[in-house]
């Protein structure tokens, strides 16, 4: 029997008393928020790792002669650490966070304003803000440097300053860096023009889109919201953006892409106060994975390779392959620590439709019994079906909580059917979702459009196919 | 830049593995070439076109994360 065809769905399952979801003892257990002290602990752990990253990787980066995909340039390490510090500083009311931010910032300063960074900002004015990112973040934290500012000012008035073409989310990054550097008084207003052109401003391709599209979404959101410091107006309604985010989140969870999953989860605390059932559940999954592994891992950290290494080479490999995903968990915890942005400790059940999860679960199997896939259509890497961490967490929920996640299950199943090119299964799934009142989602709507196109394709004369 | 991956290095590393059997490829071309040369769609042959049949990509590691309990064994080294 497939692991996904378990018959226990629909039967209440007690939520174990786990240290994973520590409730604030001062709140009611039914409505409780995630304990801020636990979020701060996770963030402090990330900041401790950041100290190691700066000490070991900030000067030279990491070069992997065996797997060049693991290479990390020092600019990336330095910039991402500075961004983490800026985000973490919004939780500075927690003393342990504040002291760590200060400690890592002092470690980072010589690298942020190194000769390499100064030369980059000087010689390549179109990239000046990129080379100055860490300097700008540190300046906003209060660690200013007038000499770097003077050089940056000169580069930004040069003719070549806009000499590089960028995608909309990268344009937003440039605008955000400039605004952060100038840090004008008062609140920012209006929607940036690049945000309208970005994937934030229009629906994502939720079924066939590339990982880079989700990456563009998450980064655009971070820059538009400015970490809730001086947020700009969103280019679409929050509900529409979060509906896209839910579908992307489903995919990331199912593919164990926790780097992106954590970035997508930022959409909730960076745009408002409420967390959906899917978002609250996803946070639980990431927290449990982090607790079990000791850090939020990425697929790039391979134990077989790690175990061939010793000493400094081993440490460098481990840090270089793991630090980015660890940092993203820190960003998420920092955002969740902002006032009013804390996730609920339990999955909200207000929108649960009775027995809806049980209707979708059978479609999570690799292939529907009635599947009749179109022949000769290439498949791209099928997602993991068994042993998913999210599935283990799902099994810990009671029936009502599971029903509250029916749309998340639907999003996962839709993506799987499309990746498998199982269009018959996709049709059956949509039919079941519609009957259960679950099909009012952008992913379901895009799936229906896909089926319409496939039906048209099949009717075309053979030479045109 | 010193940390940039050299195209030549990648190609040389692959060639050094001797995983591409050029003799076998040549044999297949020799067998297929004459008939493909007079086929209706002659552009899909190995010789005489600009078409590239061997692509080499640097692919980032995909798949899933490693066993969580085993990763925990290494977690202490991060701090």
Image: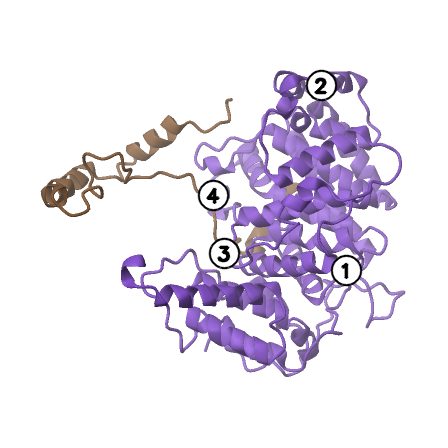
Front in this rendered view, residue A411 or A238: A238
**Which chain does tag 1 point to?**
A
What is the letter of the brown chain? B
Q: Which label is found at residue A343?
A: 1
Contact between labelled residues 3 and 1, with CB atoms less than 8 Å apart: no
Do callouts 3 and 2 mark residues in contact (Cβ within 8 Å)? Answer: no
**A302 relative position to A353: left or right:** left
Q: Residues within 10 Å of mark 4 (few under 14, many from 20)?
A: few
Q: Secondary structure at mark 4?
A: loop
Query: A391 above or below A301?
Result: below
Q: From this viewpoint, is residue A429 visible?
A: yes
The residues tagged by marks 3 and 2 sit, at their Cα atoms, a distance apart of 41 Å
Q: Nearer the viewer, mark 1 or mark 3?
A: 3
* Residue at position x 75%, y 62% in the image: A275
- Counting residues from the start of the chain, the first of labels 3 and 2 encountered is 2
Mark 1 or 3, nearer chain start: 3
The residue that label 3 is drawn on is: A208
Alpha carbon of mark 2 to alpha carbon of mark 1: how far? 44 Å
- Residue position marked by numbered label 2 in the rendering: A157
The earlier-in-sequence mark between 2 and 1 is 2
Examine the rendered structure and indicate whether residue A97 appears above or below residue A256: above
Output the chain of dot 2. Answer: A
Image depth: mark 2 or mark 4 in front: 2
Taking B64 as reference, is A281 left or right?
A: right
- Tell me if A294 is positioned left or right of B7 in this view: right
């Amino acid at each position: 029997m497939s692991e996904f065809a378990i018959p226990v769905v629909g039967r209440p399952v007690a939520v174990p008393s786990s240290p994973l979801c520590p409730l604030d003892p001062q709140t009611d257990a039914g409505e409780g928020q995630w304990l801020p002290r636990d979020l701060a602990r996770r963030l402090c752990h990330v900041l401790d790792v950041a100290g190691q990253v700066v000490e070991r990787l900030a000067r030279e980066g990491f070069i992997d002669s065996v797997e060049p995909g693991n290479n990390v340039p020092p600019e990336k390490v330095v910039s991402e650490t500075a961004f983490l510090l800026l985000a973490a500083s919004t939780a500075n009311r927690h003393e342990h966070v504040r002291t760590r931010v200060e400690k890592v910032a002092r470690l980072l300063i010589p690298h942020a304003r190194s000769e390499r960074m100064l030369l980059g900002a000087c010689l390549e004015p179109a990239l000046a803000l990129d080379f100055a990112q860490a300097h700008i973040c540190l300046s906003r934290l209060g660690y200013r440097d007038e000499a770097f500012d003077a050089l940056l000012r000169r580069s930004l008035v040069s003719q070549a300053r806009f000499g590089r073409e960028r995608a909309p989310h990268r344009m937003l990054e440039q605008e955000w860096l400039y605004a952060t550097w100038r840090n004008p008084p008062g609140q920012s207003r209006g929607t940036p023009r690049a945000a309208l052109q970005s994937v934030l401003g229009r629906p994502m391709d939720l079924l066939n889109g590339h990982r880079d599209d989700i990456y563009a979404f998450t980064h655009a959101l971070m820059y538009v919201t400015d970490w809730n410091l001086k947020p700009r107006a969103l280019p679409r309604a929050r509900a529409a953006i979060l509906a896209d985010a839910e579908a992307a989140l489903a995919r990331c969870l199912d593919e164990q892409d926790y780097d992106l999953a954590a970035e997508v989860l930022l959409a909730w605390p960076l745009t408002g106060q409420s967390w959906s059932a899917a978002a609250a559940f996803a946070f639980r999954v990431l927290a449990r994975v982090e607790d079990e592994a000791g850090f939020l891992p990425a697929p790039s950290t391979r134990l077989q390779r790690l175990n061939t290494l010793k000493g400094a080479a081993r440490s460098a490999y481990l840090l270089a392959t793991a630090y980015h995903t660890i940092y993203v968990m820190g960003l998420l915890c920092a955002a969740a620590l902002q006032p009013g942005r804390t996730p609920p400790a339990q999955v909200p059940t207000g929108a649960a439709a009775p027995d809806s999860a049980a209707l979708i679960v059978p479609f999570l199997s690799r292939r529907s019994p009635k599947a009749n896939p179109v022949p000769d259509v290439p498949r791209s890497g099928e997602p993991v079906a068994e042993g998913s961490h999210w599935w283990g967490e799902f099994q810990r929920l009671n029936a009502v909580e599971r029903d509250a996640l029916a749309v998340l299950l639907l999003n996962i199943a839709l993506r799987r059917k499309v990746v498998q090119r199982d269009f018959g299964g996709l049709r059956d799934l949509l039919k079941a979702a519609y009957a259960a009142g679950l099909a009012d989602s952008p992913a379901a709507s895009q799936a229906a459009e896909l089926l319409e196109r496939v039906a048209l394709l099949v009717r075309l004369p053979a030479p045109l196919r | 830049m010193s940390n940039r991956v050299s195209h030549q290095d990648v190609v040389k590393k692959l060639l050094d593995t001797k995983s591409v059997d050029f003799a076998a490829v040549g044999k297949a071309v020799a067998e297929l070439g004459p008939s493909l040369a007079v086929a209706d769609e002659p552009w899909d042959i190995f010789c005489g076109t600009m078409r590239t049949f061997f692509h080499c990509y640097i692919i980032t590691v995909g798949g899933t994360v490693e066993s969580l309990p085993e990763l925990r064994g290494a977690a202490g080294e991060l701090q």
